[in-house]
Amino acid sequence: PAGGVMVAAVTMIGIASATAEDLCLSDAIPKAQRRKLQSKGGVPRPIGFWVHQWDSAQLANLIAMTLTEEVLGYETVVSGEGESSTTGLYATAGCTNPDAYLEEDLALGPGCSPDP
């Protein structure tokens, strides 16, 4: 099936980029020169990417991470993964429990607050 081929291709590209210093783009910013963002408290942090579990989302994340690293020059990290777009939205918003909508007891919610 085509989906299986895509998963294999994305996995192989991801493994290659994670284990080698090879760069995808000819004019890429080398890993040693990449920056981190500064948090509100001045703590350096890489840009986090929330990865969804379907093939097209994984491919889009791989492309976005590569461009963020090699073109913009920022460090990236996979900060988590989820089953739906809702979990990604809650995670990006800084919620402590982005999978809350999957739980039987929704009383606690996703753990979002106005002060990240």
Image: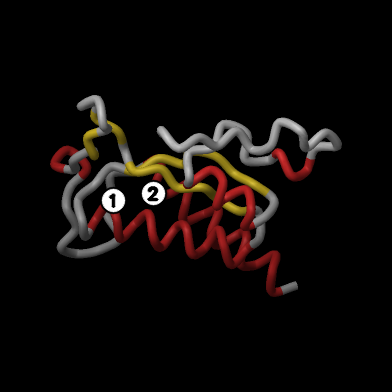
Q: Nearer the viewer, residue 77 or 115?
A: 115
Classify mark 2: helix, strand or loop: helix
Seen in the picture, residue 4 relative to 33 is either above or below; the reply is: below
Q: Which residue is mark 2?
A: 17
Label 1: few (<14), some (14–19) or many (≥20) C-alpha neighbours in 10 Å: few
Q: Which mark is residue 22?
A: 1
Q: Residue at x 41, y 43 (%)?
A: 48
Residue 54: image location, x then y, percent:
66, 60
Q: Residue at x 47, y 58 (%)?
A: 61
Left or right position of 116 against 57: left
Q: Residue at x 78, y 37 (%)?
A: 106
**Label 1–label 2 contact, CB within 8 A:** yes
Left or right position of 50 against 83: left
Classify mark 1: helix, strand or loop: loop
Instruction: Specify the quadrant of the image occupied by residue 9.
Output: bottom right
Q: CA distance from mark 1 to mark 2?
A: 7 Å
Three-letter amino acid code of the residue under disc 1: Asp
Quadrant location of the N terminus? bottom right
